[in-house]
Amino acid sequence: MIFSRSAMEFQDFILIAACSLGFISLCKTFIRFVKWAWVSFFRPAKNLNEYGSWALVTGSTDGIGKALAFELASEGINLVLVGRNPSKLEATSNEIQEKFAGKVDVKGIVIDFAKLSGKEISNMVEEGIKGLDVGILINNAGMGSPYPMFLHEVESEVLESLVRVNMDAATWVTRAVLPGMLQKKKGAIVNIGSGSSMAVPAFPLGTVYASTKAYLAMFSRCISLEYEQHGIDVQCQVPLYVATKMIRGFKTASLFTPSPEMYSKASIRCIGYEHICTPYWLHSVQWFLIQRLPVAFLNWYMFRFFLKISKRRMESYKYEVSSVNR
């Protein structure tokens, strides 16, 4: 009887403990969901004008960079636009000035990140922003390979350009802008990363692109710790697919692939908060679902998916090149 009673008491204890752990786990999940909903839909955006009257945006003539420039202008923030194509830079400046006539000033700096050294980039930016109260920096400039390919297939010039545009440019532009932010003890730096470096365990056939974007995430974490005591908010935004010209096959916006305008509205709301974030709410849903899948399955699927795209795009790319050379 004594043994039987002890056994029953032990079973009751196990049952209570299991129920308690389950309840705690459920509460933690509920709290995480409430926090996600608050951040995604209800949290107010910061007053970006408090950082300064000017924002510098790289890669500002297309896609996310251009959309972010328009969003910043809508907040009454003057713009320093950085791009490699003078005519596109002028066209974008004119578009912004026409839409926000008299409300913002726009200045352009022509820099080809793929062709200049880091020191040259830094000097040009320093000269371009001299005398301006630059409070926000958006490191958006980026490039990818023409199509998914094995590392040994990437041409040396393309590989070097990938590293220079995706890594070196952000590093040297940030270095050029930091002294002004340190002097006034406030500023915001936003580096546009990629889900290719964080949402999935590997990004085969896009190795260099994903690796350079992983650098931006670590770069952001490190300088965030270095400069938060000086009032400078550093953030790496990690979008998944956005309908831009850089992503072949994803140029049309859809529910899970937002337009640059849709993404930029979410992006602006996140500036000044988390060090690493995924602004567009359906991207964070995708990320959550992806992380529930086995790593082995994701690696198998990603490799075969991009291998299939590579074969199809390679033929298309060769045809385009041959057509141009005729």
Image (cartoon, rainbow, N blue to C red):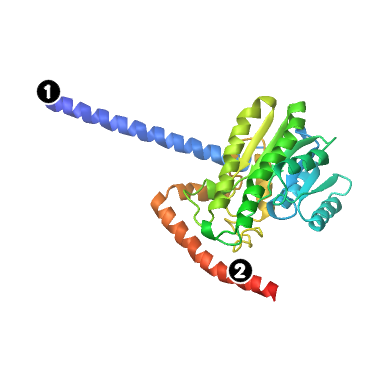
Residue located at (17% from left, 25% from top): 6
- Residue positioned most to the top: 2
In the rendered view, tell whether residue 312 sits above or below residue 8: below
Q: Is residue 48 visible?
A: no
Is the C terminus in the top left, top right, bottom left or bottom right quadrant? Answer: bottom right
Q: Is residue 264 left or right of residue 10?
A: right
Assign a secondary structure to mark 2.
helix
Q: Is residue 2 visible?
A: yes
Q: Is residue 252 left or right of residue 52?
A: left
Label 1 crowd bin: few (<14), some (14–19), many (20+), radius 10 Å: few
Badge 1 amino acid: Ile
Q: Residue 192: which quarter of the image?
A: top right
Label 2 crowd bin: few (<14), some (14–19), many (20+), radius 10 Å: some
Task: Residue 324 in the image: state x and y as whole percent.
Answer: 69, 72
Badge 2 amino acid: Tyr
Task: Residue 13 in the image: state x and y as whole percent.
Answer: 26, 28
Residue 2 is marked as 1
Residue 317 is marked as 2
The answer to which of marks 1 and 2 sits earlier in the sequence is 1
Q: Residue 138: which quarter of the image?
A: top right
Residue located at (53% from left, 38% from top): 34
Residue 176 is marked as none
Task: Residue 323 in the image: state x and y as whole percent.
Answer: 67, 75
Q: Residue 175: which quarter of the image?
A: top right
How far apart marks 1 and 2 lie (CA) works out to 81 Å
How many marks can you see? 2
Assign a secondary structure to mark 1.
helix
Residue located at (70% from left, 42% from top): 118
- Residue positioned most to the left: 1
Marks 1 & 2, CB-CB < 8 Å contact: no
Q: Is residue 289 left or right of residue 118?
A: left
- Residue positioned most to the right: 102
